[in-house]
Image: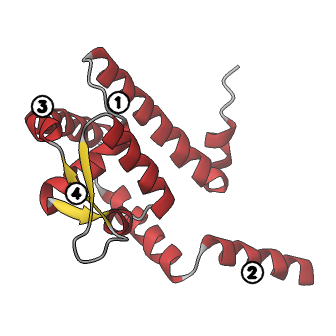
Amino acid sequence: MNLDLIRDLGYKALDSRLKRISDRISHDVRKFYKEFNIDIEPNWYLVFMLLQKEEEIPIAAIAEALGYSHPSVVIIVKKMVDKGYLNVKKDNADKRKQMVSLSNKAIKMLPQLEQIWHSCERSILHLLADDLGILNHLDNIDLELKKNSFHDRFKQEYLKSNIS
């Protein structure tokens, strides 16, 4: 039996399709890290990359730069601190802010991590057959959802269908 309901539903299951692809990639990256005894999570690379550029920034700025919720970034940062990859300290000017920076352990690992990320990027490019058109579609979806949330969009459609 070759049933693939998510694929068969097409655009109707877009969120599930994107999640399934994301889960597959994350699972395989996690598996790779485990094979090479690298004790990090797949979603941490964005924090590593951001802090590599910014050196020290507040948690709220990480959340904003990544488009993640503040609570989810707090969880990621805590896990990274627990593994020794990040330093967190109170901001001198505003004691409510927690400033985040890469630890010496993370800085020492960066060359290896950059090599891994580069290999991962090339693998994704091969998956896309060097066609980055999908990124334009994702940019458009992101932009449209910033203008009008999906909640508002489907609520409006639902209400229209109940009026008719």
Task: Give the amino acid at mark 4.
Answer: Leu
Q: Are marks 3 and 1 in contact (CB under 8 Å)?
A: no
The residue that disc 4 covers is 50
Residue 84, percent across and down? Answer: 26, 36
Q: Residue at x 11, y 41 (%)?
A: 107
Asked whether, in this view, residue 21 is left or right of residue 154, the answer is left
The residue that disc 3 covers is 112
Seen in the picture, residue 40 relative to 159 is either above or below; the reply is above
Q: Residues within 10 Å of mark 1 (few under 14, many from 20)?
A: some
Q: Secondary structure at mark 3?
A: helix
The residue that disc 2 covers is 156
Spatial separation of the CA atoms under disc 1 and disc 2: 39 Å
Residue 63, percent across and down? Answer: 38, 64
Spatial separation of the CA atoms under disc 1 and disc 4: 19 Å
Mark in the foreground, 2 or 4: 4
Spatial separation of the CA atoms under disc 3 and disc 1: 14 Å
Q: Residues within 10 Å of mark 3 (few under 14, many from 20)?
A: few
Q: Earlier in the sequence, mark 2 or mark 3?
A: 3
Q: Residue at x 33, y 19 (%)?
A: 34
The residue that disc 1 covers is 29
Tell me the quadrant of the picture where the N terminus can be found.
Answer: top right
Q: Earlier in the sequence, mark 3 or mark 1?
A: 1
Q: Nearer the viewer, residue 99 or 108?
A: 99
